[in-house]
Image: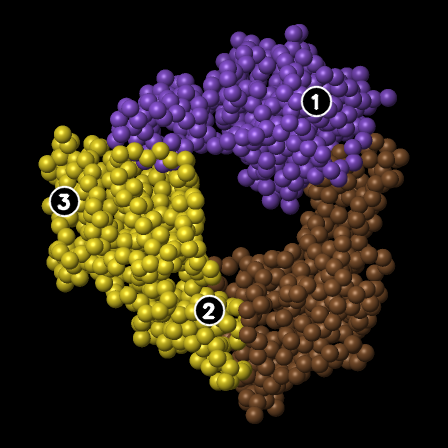
Chain colours: A yellow, B purple, C brown
């Protein structure tokens, strides 16, 4: 694994990478990333994952604690997720070699303890937060679990829901989409107009982007009552607010993480944070989630891309489908060498400038920025329906 | 895009190509080609196409006029067919950039007119004829729309139907099949014998091929009442007559265009030209078309190739399925270096000789032949059922 | 086709190969291999096959005799299985060229006998044995049909059933699995425990492997009443006994052949030899086979690999599914360069040593071993349920 010591001539190429030996892969591995929605990993079960070009086994011990180790048994290379979780360890289906959550082999039944003591596979720290299992895939000690935290997620009176989808495009397209306030005026009017589209009109916003201690603060102003702010956290997470299904209900906070599977696939995690409205209303919210959240635009690819058949449900389906079409229609890896950026791409320009700055530091062996949680409470204003356009 | 200046040592390779930078790609781009059946493109709608290795957006303006432009928006590379047709223009889903049918950007909402005026994507002339949308993908002014025209298609008393299918094989295999009268005696007896098979017996024909001002005239004689003539037009269109469903009805004229999608896929356009038989009979003909024409052999690949389950309908399904099996069974790109041609392949030999002659002229920068519509009315004789074999 | 004259530095690579120009491909072609279950090839029908990287046409003449010839017609490269079997010959769909079972062209209808006499495609000896069609794909005269024969298969009082499946992994993984007695204690307890799992406990066996005149004799001892012996025949066939569905019934002999399709796919043939128990019981056995044998783990890939949904039927489905998971979970081609073998892999070590010895002889142009049928009756002992573990 030889890491490059400078950026390549085509600086766009490095933005889309994430594998271990790449500059971006090394930079991304300095951060905690979500790897699965917590409720998809039952106690005592295992899953196969591919994250940033690495094949992994995610399992949950019988205690409920999550662990992340390499995909394959050291013995004959069989994928461990096909085996058995026993206690806090996982046993290979083929010859019963057993590993703990650090990747240490603890038993090789037909060989004995002298063998197992010498065997170790990759193991990564994992933990849960805000409905997601996070992991640290870098070397050495993980950073404090600070950057992903948000006050809103930790309030006692919220319901948190989380899900993931795999989309057939590169992760950086989705990150750029987070820094692109103009797209809302077009993409989120495709295939119908949910509350989000109704409230954020098709007017072109005035834009303001500024680097923060956590990432980028994005402000899009479409008029006096229509100022959208999003709090983007380096390297791949956005935090926005979106309108509720019915007027008068509280707005919904959303976290969006765009994690690379490999260069051509994206793990898209979305969390929905609802303020509690009492037992009965919360039960309705849970039912609504259970009914509508399983929609995955990748399973409706042709309908969306060729026949423009968009889902009707506005909160959990339509906006996902709209973003899916815009991002996947850029191709598996967008051809940035032939794009034509303009003044309205200011967020994307800032985003890339920051990434290239960090990647250059990484390549030169210099310290990269010590990103940290915002040191002030963030106000993400809501919008008024049909607010007027900016001057 | 560097064009070769001579044919490669393996002259077979160049026959199967069609991408812009290839010799064949440049030669093909001197002609009008069908790109879609006219009735699959509703006013105000758009499709993504791949033709001769190029990705394209075909759309029809609200006026009904067809336009062909590049697949992707110049801004961030999103495929335009996912956007909106507005008037005679198409707007990108991502940030609303709008293009007219020549590829000129007419609006970049968040940028302004100084930007849009400088933006242009590829745009190609398109027009309708004989139930198909044709386009000219070459450089400069298109040739007069003359070569694709046939008197039969322009009679006032005909019903014209058109469809397309994508087959998983190279286009030149299908072109060669047009110049191969012997295949009728075998392929069109596979899986059942429709009227075509019954009338053209399994007897081996005497063959005659001659170059015309439009392409190649093909004559296959199986006996006194069994002379088949087809009028092949350079570079990829055949015109034949086939027997009707019921004796006594007029024979059906058919146009067959074999347009490259890419090296391994073929867009096969077929038109069926029926002489009108009065209002009621014509209604029946339309109903018959609507009932049976949607069959696509590519959707029945395994049934046809492995289980020999052929469709029963003889006119619109069986003969298509039979040709599909013969051509796809040659492989994605037929291995011409190992074939064993004989005297019965005279049509294929002439066809290749003409193509190589034109490609050599193309490579040397000399003029290629000025193919033009036949300057005389063509007589395509019908056959008598069970006519005797040639002497 | 240039054959290497020595083993490559990475000796693992050669183990997984089988194409004609490879050392392993040449070695394997010195033996008869099964290519299809006999009952899948009806008289007068043809199939396309891929075996050891070669594309082939398997057909059965109207007399019932099987023939194996090249996949494609010499004329224009069309796959022959799409054509017609006539008598003992096969005719191409495209222009009717006809071939006999040796690959000799016997008719080229539009060319004449002077042409057909000069045309020959590959043709290989084929014959039936024990419910399977075998073929010899090597050069020159085939060896006597001796090595595949077993006394048990030739008893007058047995019912023989045979089937094949294509699995998405390399053939040599499956051969190694045959020489791996320990896997039984783990793999065959995954997803449930059929009679096989119940009788062979999870205890780790004492192992003994020895080379025979036919292949390798494998003995796994788990206790006094629990000694499993298998008779493995070079290069890719195992013969084992497995317990019946109900106690008191005779044990079932099984033949397992692992034939390469290509480097990433395996043709797995399994035969089940039941001792006859009288007319009525045999009818029940046939019914049981017809009901349960069509299960193919490859058609349940995700259910087995991701969701651990194993079939319930223990004899014909569960053990197949368990082996499928273990072998396919090693990847398309197991990464042997990074494995960690131990003392319990003694069978695999012996197996590879024998293969490398034979491959070195093959590379040096020296004689390879003259493997022959065991010259003594083989005793494959049955086990007692819940026998005690070895000391």
Number of marks: 3
Q: CA distance from mark 3 to mark 1?
A: 70 Å
| Drawn side of residue C391 relative to residue A378, left or right | right
Q: Residue A39: tell me if it is visible.
A: no
Subunit bearing disc 2: A
**Which of pointers 2 and 3 lies earlier in the amino acid sequence?**
2
Q: Which residue is mark 3?
A: A382
Q: Quadrant of residue A28?
A: bottom left
Label drawn at residue B357? 1
- Can you give x and y, in whole percent of width and height, for residue A186 in the image? 27, 34
Verify CB contact (< 8 Å) between mark 1 and mark 2: no
**Badge number at residue B317:** none
> Badge 3 local density, few (<14 within 10 Å), some, or many (20+)?
some
Q: Residue at x 38, y 51 (%)?
A: A266
Q: Nearer the viewer, residue C18 or A210?
A: A210
Q: Percent from the top left, x then y, of residue C75? A: 77, 37
Front one among C19 and B111:
B111
Instruction: Locate residue A140 relative to residue C372 in the image: left or right.
Output: left
What mark, if any, has residue A80 been given in the picture? 2
């Amino acid at each position: 694994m030889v890491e490059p010591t400078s950026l390549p001539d085509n600086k766009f190429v490095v933005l889309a990478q994430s594998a271990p030996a790449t500059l971006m892969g090394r930079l991304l591995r300095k951060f905690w990333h979500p790897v699965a929605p917590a409720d998809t990993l039952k106690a005592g079960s295992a899953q196969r994952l591919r994250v940033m070009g690495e094949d992994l086994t995610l399992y949950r011990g019988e205690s409920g604690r999550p662990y992340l180790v390499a995909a394959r048994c050291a013995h004959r290379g069989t994928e461990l997720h096909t085996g058995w979780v026993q206690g806090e360890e996982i046993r290979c289906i083929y010859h019963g070699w057993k590993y703990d959550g650090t990747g240490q082999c603890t038993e090789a039944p037909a060989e004995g303890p002298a063998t197992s003591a010498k065997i170790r596979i990759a193991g990564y720290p994992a933990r849960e937060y805000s409905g997601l299992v996070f992991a640290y895939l870098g070397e050495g000690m993980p950073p404090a679990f600070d950057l992903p935290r948000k006050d809103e997620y930790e309030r006692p009176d919220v319901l948190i829901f989380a899900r993931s989808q795999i989309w057939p495009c590169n992760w950086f397209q989705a990150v750029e989409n987070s820094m692109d306030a103009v797209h809302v005026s077009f993409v989120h009017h495709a295939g119908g107009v949910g509350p989000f589209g109704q409230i954020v009109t098709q007017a072109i916003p005035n834009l303001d982007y500024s680097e923060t201690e956590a990432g980028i603060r994005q402000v899009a102003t479409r008029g006096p009552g229509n100022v959208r702010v999003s709090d983007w956290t380096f390297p791949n997470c956005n935090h926005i607010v979106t309108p509720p299904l019915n007027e008068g209900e509280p707005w919904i906070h959303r976290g969006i993480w765009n994690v690379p599977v490999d260069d051509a696939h994206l793990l898209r995690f979305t969390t929905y944070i609802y303020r509690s409205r009492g037992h009965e209303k919360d039960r309705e919210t849970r039912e609504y989630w259970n009914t509508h959240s399983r929609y995955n635009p990748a399973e409706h690819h042709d309908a969306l891309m060729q026949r423009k058949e968009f889902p009707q449900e506005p909160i959990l389906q339509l906006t996902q489908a709209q973003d899916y079409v815009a991002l996947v229609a850029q191709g598996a890896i967008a051809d940035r060498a032939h794009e034509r950026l303009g003044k309205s791409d200011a967020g994307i320009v800032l985003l890339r400038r920051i990434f290239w700055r960090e990647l250059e530091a990484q390549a030169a062996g210099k310290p990269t920025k010590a990103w940290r949680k915002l040191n002030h409470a963030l106000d993400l204003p809501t919008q008024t329906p049909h607010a007027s356009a900016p001057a």
